[in-house]
Image: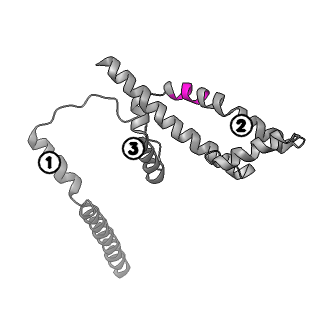
Amino acid sequence: MKKLAKYLRLLLILVGWTVFYLWIIGLIMNYFWHFNIFEKRYWLIISEFWSAGGVIDQPSEYMFLLMLVLIVPGWFWGFRKARQLSYVKIIFFPVFWYHDYISRKYAGQPSHIVLKNMGGGKIKKQTPQQMMEEMISSRMPQAKEKKDLNSSKIRSNFEQKNRKFHEKMESGDS
């Protein structure tokens, strides 16, 4: 079973790499030299040029010849590199790529966040009653207590001023 899986992997890589490589080479050759490597008439043009004693004298012709010569070694080199890739990475490449794309698109933050100083102390156990009291006290507005303190201060200040005023009035009468 392992041998079959190994051959299946090799076949998948062989077919995938060959299709991809020939597509890339076809694009490059067509873009730079308008030469389609898959059509016979282009190869006949090269053969006629060579048979007629054609001379390669321009840099673009040298690059064209070098490209033709390096097609096969480039395929072997790429196939060797493709065999080193993980089988899972090859099959699930679209899934991984889409996940990375979505992560980059929607998550401006790094995926791993280290939180520091989050209270390294031990958490003491609370009874349900204590938990309820804590929840209620945290949700109750404390502005009422402050208001009561403020009104009592105002009341005491008013009483002091009123007392001083009455004392002043009584001392002024005598």
For badge 2, the amino acid type reads: Leu
Residue 68 numbered tag: 2
Q: Secondary structure at mark 2?
A: helix
Q: Is residue 115 visible?
A: no
Residue appearing at x 87%, y 39% in the figure: 53
Q: Provide residue 147's location: percent of width, then percent of height.
A: 28, 66
Residue beneath disc 3? 95
Q: Dot 2: few (<14), some (14–19), or many (≥20) neighbours within 10 Å?
A: few
Q: Of tags 1 and 2, which is closer to the observer?
A: 2
Q: Verify CB contact (< 8 Å) between mark 1 and mark 2.
A: no
Magenta-drawn stretch contains 78: yes
Up/down of 13 relative to 56, above or below: above
Q: Which one is nearer the viewer's eye here, 111 or 120?
A: 111
Distance from the alpha carbon under mark 1 to that under mark 2:
83 Å
Upstream in sequence: badge 1 or badge 2 = 2
Would you identify the image quadrant in which residue 21 lies? top right
Magenta-drawn stretch contains 124: no
Residue beneath disc 1? 133
Please identify the residue farthest to the bottom as the structure is shown: 173
For badge 3, the amino acid type reads: Val
Q: Of tags 3 and 1, which is closer to the observer?
A: 3
Our reading of the magenta stretch's main secondary structure is helix
Q: Which one is nearer the viewer's eye here, 173 or 142?
A: 142
Residue 94 numbered tag: none
- In magenta, the rendered stretch is 77-82
Q: Provide residue 159's location: percent of width, then percent of height.
A: 29, 71
Q: Dot 3: few (<14), some (14–19), or many (≥20) neighbours within 10 Å?
A: few
Up/down of 150 relative to 122, above or below: below
